[in-house]
Amino acid sequence: MVDYEKKANMEFMEQRQSMEKNMVSMAREVEKLRAELASMDGRHWGAGMTCFLYCPLQNLSSFSR
């Protein structure tokens, strides 16, 4: 049973690391797109969306009210 739990924990950690890498990659892409938009229309996007990228579940819950 202990070996099973160790294997499950290792798989969980690998999955978590993969998801974190994907999230960082998506955040970089969003920043590139945001910079492109800002250069097109002259507006600068605020830093408020950065928190949304790193805390999506917390911020989504506030929209459901």
Image: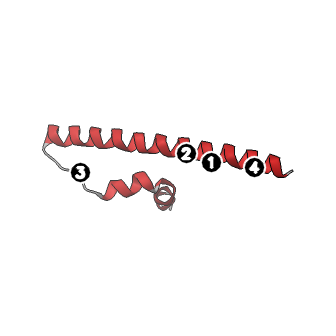
Dot 4 alpha-carbon crowd within 10 angstroms: few under 14, some 14 to 19, many 20 or more: few
Which is more N-terminal, label 4 or label 1?
4
Front: mark 2 or 3: 2
Disc 2: which residue: 17
Q: Dots 3 and 4: beta carbons under 8 Å?
A: no
- Give the x, y percent position of residue 43: 16, 48
- Give the x, y percent position of residue 60: 48, 55
Which is more N-terminal, label 3 or label 2?
2
Which is more N-terminal, label 1 or label 3?
1
Q: What element carries label 4?
A: helix
Cα distance in 3D space between marks 3 and 1: 34 Å
Which is more N-terminal, label 4 or label 3?
4
Instruction: Tell me the tag on residue 6.
Output: 4
- Give the x, y percent position of residue 45: 23, 51
Disc 3: which residue: 45
Q: Which amino acid does label 4 sit on?
A: Lys
Which is more N-terminal, label 2 or label 4?
4
Instruction: Tell me the tag on residue 13.
Output: 1
Q: Is residue 63 left or right of residue 44?
A: right
Q: Is residue 37 left or right of residue 27?
A: left
